[in-house]
Amino acid sequence: MHESFYQYTHAVAQYVRHATGKEKAALRKELNDHMADHAQALLAGGFPEDHACRVAVESMGDPAEVGKALNKEYPLRWLVLSRLVWLAVLVVALLLILALAHGLKGAAGSLAARYAPMEHHHAEVQLPDAELVPLDFTQTFPNGDVIHFYAAAVDAEAQYMDRGYVGHLFAVCYNRNPLRDSLYHPGFIHCLTDAPKEETLVSLDGSSYGNAEYAHWVIYFVHPTEPVTVQYDRYGTSFTLEIPLPWEEVAVP
Amino acid sequence: MKKVRTRKEKTLLGCLTLVLLLAIAMGTHLMGFTPGQNVRAVEDLLGLAPTEPVMDRDDLYLTENEDVLLLTAYHPGLWRDHWGNNSLNFVAMDKSDDALAVGGGYWNREFALSTLHLFGEVFLEEAASVRAYYPVDPSFGHRPVELTAEVFTAHNGGRYFWSVTQVETNSFDTLPSALDVLDQDGNVLYTWDMTDNWSGEG
C-alpha cells in the first residue's frame, strides 16, 4: 500500500466510529483498491507515480467528510442486535454441549448393559455361593426403555430351615437411545413365586452404571423346579414373564 | 479477500442458528418454554398417551389420561435439568389402583422452609378428605410431619386432592409413609402405603 493511501484510509477510518476492527480493515482495503486503480490508470496515461498517487488521493475528497458519511453505513443498532443474537447462540450451544456430554458420559453404561451386562453386574453384586446362569428375557416399555433379565441363580448353600432356597434374579434397564437415562425403575416390578404372597419375601437392591440401572432381586423362598413370575402393571403398561430358575445347577437333596 | 458480511446478514444468520439450536433443544426435551411443552416432553420421555389438563397451582401442572395422573413442574428459564430427571421435574401417579392415585412432592426452595405437596385423585364416592402420616410411634426419634387435604370435584368431574403445606425444614425429618382416605365423618375408607410416592428436591 502506498504511504499516501495508507494515511488517507487511516484518516477515514478514524471517523467510522461504529465499525468493528474487521469492518474497518475491509473498508480500508476497499478504499485502497479504489485509489490504486485510479493511480494505475493515471500511470498508464504517462503521469509520474507520485503525481498519480496524489491525484488519486485528492479525488477521494476530505477524509473527515468521507469518514462521517461512511459511518452512517454502520448503524449501531444492528451491531448490538447481532451481538445479542450470537451471545444467545453461544449460551444455547453451551447448554446443548453440556447435555450431550452428560448423555455421552452415560452412553457407555447403556451400551455395556446391552452387550455385556454380566461384567458390570459382577462389580456391583457379590454372590460367593451361587452359580450365575445367563438368561435372555427382555421387555420393552413404550418410551424405548428395555428391561433385560440377564441372569439367575439359586443359592443352595443358603437353605433356611427347610423353608426353601434363595433365588436370585438379575436385570438391567436401559433405553434404546444410549444417550437417554432409563426412566422405568425396576423397583416397580414384582417378583412372585408359587407360594402364597405372605410366605414370600423379596428384596431388591440395585446400582446404576451410566444410563443403565441394574437390579438384583433376592427371593426368599423358592422351591425346586418353581419358576419366578415377574409382573409389571403401571402407567398403562403391563406384562408378566415366567422366568425359570437354574434348578439343574443345584444339587437338590 | 473474504467477503465481510453486513450487520443485517450477521444478525439474520445468528437468528437462523438460534432457531435451529432451540429446535434441537426442544426436540431433545432439554428446554421447554411453556408448561404445555414440558407436559408433552414428559409424556414423550415416559411414552405416555397424551394427558389432559386438570388444574395447576403455582408452577405445577396436573394433567391426566386414563392410566396416569401426571404432575409436571414448569420452571421458566433455559435449563430444565439433565434430560428430564423425574425426581425433579415430574411425578407420575399410576391409576391402576381402584381407590386412588397419589403423589407427594417436596421442594426446599427456601433454606428454612420446605414446601410439601400432597396430591392425587380418589375414585371412592364417599371420600371427603385424605390424611398422610407416619404410622410408627414418633417416640423412636422420628420427627414426622402430618398432612391433610380436602377432596374436591374438578371441572372434568374427577375428584382430586391437593394440599400445599410449608413447614420449617428443621422441624421434621420423616415424610408421611401412609395415607388414609376418610369419609365425611372421619372414618377410614382406605389406607395406602405411600412410601414410594414421594419425589422432590432439596
Image (cartoon, coloured by chain):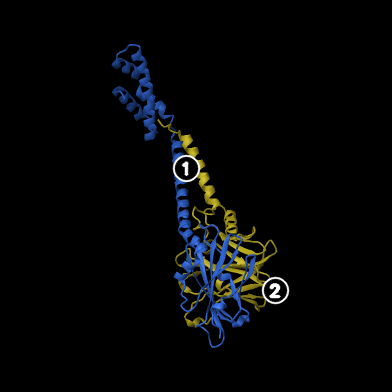
Do badges 1 and 2 share one subunit? Answer: no
Residue B15 percent coordinates (x, y):
50, 41
Q: Nearer the viewer, residue A76 or A168?
A: A168
- What is the display colour for chain B? yellow
Snapshot quadrant of residue A12: top left
**Host chain of mark 2:** B
Q: Which residue type carries mark 2?
A: Glu
Image quadrant in which the N terminus of chain A is located: top left
Snapshot quadrant of residue B117: bottom right
Q: Residues within 10 Å of mark 1 (few under 14, many from 20)?
A: many
Q: Is residue B147 visible?
A: yes
Q: Which residue is mark 2?
A: B126
Residue A191 percent coordinates (x, y):
59, 74
Taking A183 as reference, is A20 left or right?
A: left
Q: Nearer the viewer, residue A11 or A47?
A: A47
Residue B108 percent coordinates (x, y):
48, 65
